[in-house]
Amino acid sequence: MDYVSVPVVPEILRAKVGVFVDLYRKTQQLERLNRELEQRVTERTAALDRERELLQKIFDKIPVMIVLYRPDTRVLQLNQEFERVTGWSTEEARQGDLMARCYPDPTYREEVQAFMESAQEGWKDIVMTTREGQTIQTMWSNLRLSDETQIGIGVDITERKRAEESQKLLTEVRERNRLAHELHDNVAQA
């Protein structure tokens, strides 16, 4: 094979070498930036995983009932406290009409459903039926997220309501005793 000898022009050679050196530097810079971006993505993913784990643990362990549901009140997820208090699991809630089970009276169910769909601020006392058929007193508030998912936050207030009723009865008994003593004293003086 014969080669044709071409004279080397130093300026052209420097320019070509300069282009390759510049290309090498830019390639190195891009590789470094890519590693940095991958590191940032890895760190951000780890941070999001930690946040998700934290929120899931709070959701699972907080001692209030939490229900995630769609705007049409179909259940997405229940927390452990809801399951403990009512006896209904997330799977059971997804498979059937939880609203009909918890609120057997259709008129009352419509009232509760309207409250849930409104996601209005404040708390509302609501009577629920558990899986075992027991009636419990609860108090609920609802929030709407930006994606239209809603969160119901509830507290079992059955014991508090019983205590209030007992206190009311005790107050009535004391008042009757006081009136009976007054009547007795008035009769004795007469």
Image (spheres, rainbow, N blue to C red):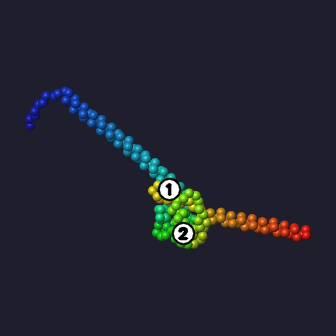
Q: Is residue 102 visible?
A: no
Image location of residue 188, percent across then percent down: 90, 69
Image location of residue 82, percent across then percent down: 55, 63
Residue identified by numbered label 2: 109
Residue type beneath disc 2: Arg
Q: What kind of element bears circle 1?
A: helix
3D distance between C-alphas at marks 1 and 2? 29 Å
The label nearer to you, 1 versus 2, is 2
Image location of residue 176, percent across then percent down: 78, 68
Q: Is 81 situated left or right of 179 in this image?
A: left
Q: Is residue 52 visible?
A: yes
Residue ranking furthest to the left: 2
Among numbered discs 1 and 2, the one appearing first in the sequence: 1
On screen, residue 160 above or below 18: below
Residue identified by numbered label 1: 56
Among the 4 quarters of the image, the one containing residue 21: top left
Q: Residues within 10 Å of mark 2 (few under 14, many from 20)?
A: some
